[in-house]
Image (tube, helix red, strand yellow):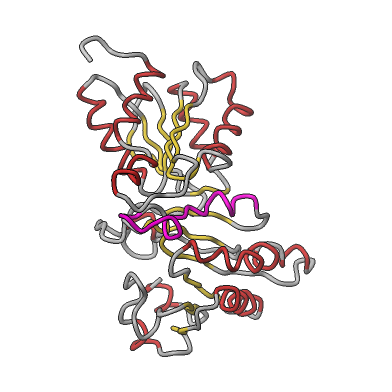
Amino acid sequence: MRVLLLHLASITHTSEDVGHYGGSYKVSNGLYKKYGEMRLLDTPICENGFLGMGVGAAMTGLRPIVEGMNMGFLLLAFNQISNNCGMLHYTSGGQFKVPMVIRGPGGVGRQLGAEHSQRLESYFQSIPGVQLVACSTVANSKALLNDNPIIFFEHVLLYNVKGEVHPGDYCQCLERAEMVREGTDVTIFCYSRMRYVVMQAVAELEKQGYNPEVIDLISLKPFDMETISKSIKKTRKAIIVEECMKTGGIGASLSAVIHESLFNELDHEVLRLSSQDVPTSYAYDLEAATIVQPEKVVEAVHKICGVRAGV
């Protein structure tokens, strides 16, 4: 975002507290002093208002970045996101584009309670015309924008993650998955914070003699079927790990696509590890029990690959 603000005068950033305060998680810290209130615009607490304003700004030539202070609050602007943002290019007969990014923190944090632990990717995946992206590292969060409306999911527990950024003008392609670890036994698909949960499990699985392949989806809509197909044709087994709810989640959509298009390449049905279909508890132990933990990933690999001797 800082690079875009520097190089493109059409970029604006709008939401509650993104200007003077620098954002609830300090993502825009220091930018107000540099670019002023016309490009870092503080708004009232009115999600449907400032999301609608963002759509209008995008229609008239700007490239607004609109933050949801917490992604759960964006449900208040569901009409603006679905009926306006996602459909205007179609309903206007191509007269208008909506090159808009909606971004912000979400996911299960640490004892934030049910309303602040929402995973909205499952809510938005059925909206036509909207791309869904979930970043997990510093490198894949530096993404190349396009003329489509994009919902950019940032996990509340990943803001402290540090890493190398691709030099120069290189950016992550929004439609491309990332090969995190090559392997031969089973493909584990994940995204956002679950990448780190999976890699904790992989460390244990390596000790047990397993060789899993790990793919970070990044693009939740559309899926990178080229990378997904290539991996499944190699390993012939798949596990999907997500923080989303199991009913109607991203994993459900990906599992359906894999079974429909790659059924004959599979030696085992796709396994899904997802959050429990319950509101997220404030109590730490109950919260942890509702989401996927590394030992669950290990158990799933044992189930799909068989238990190795000595394990």
Q: Is residue 188 above or below residue 235?
A: below
Q: Is residue 154 above or below residue 286?
A: below
Which residue is rendered at x = 50% and y = 49% of the image? Answer: 219
Q: Position of residue 44 (x, y in %)?
A: 50, 83
Count the numbered circles shown.
0
Residue 270: give x, y in percent of width and height: 50, 26
Q: Image height check: is 212 above or below 98? A: above
Answer with left or right where residue 142 lies relative to residue 308.
right
Per the rendered image, the range of residues in magenta is 109-126
Q: Is residue 52 magenta?
A: no
Q: Which of the 4 image quadrants contains residue 25?
A: bottom left
Q: Residue furthest top?
A: 309
Q: Residue at x 69, y 68 (%)?
A: 84
Q: Nearer the viewer, residue 263 or 229?
A: 263
Residue shown at 43% from the left, 55% from the top: 114
By secondary structure, the bulk of the magenta-drawn segment is best described as: loop
Question: In the image, 251: left or right of 161?
Answer: right
Q: Is residue 119 magenta?
A: yes
Place of residue 41 in the rendered image (x, y in percent of width and height, measured from the top left): 47, 84
Percent position of residue 91, x then y: 78, 65
Which one is nearer the viewer's eye here, 292 or 13? 292
Relative vertical location of residue 279 with respect to residue 296 in this rendering, above or below: below
Taking 206 as reference, is 188 left or right? right
Say which quadrant the C terminus sits in: top left
Res 153 quadrant in image: bottom left
The image quadrant where one finds the N terminus is: bottom left
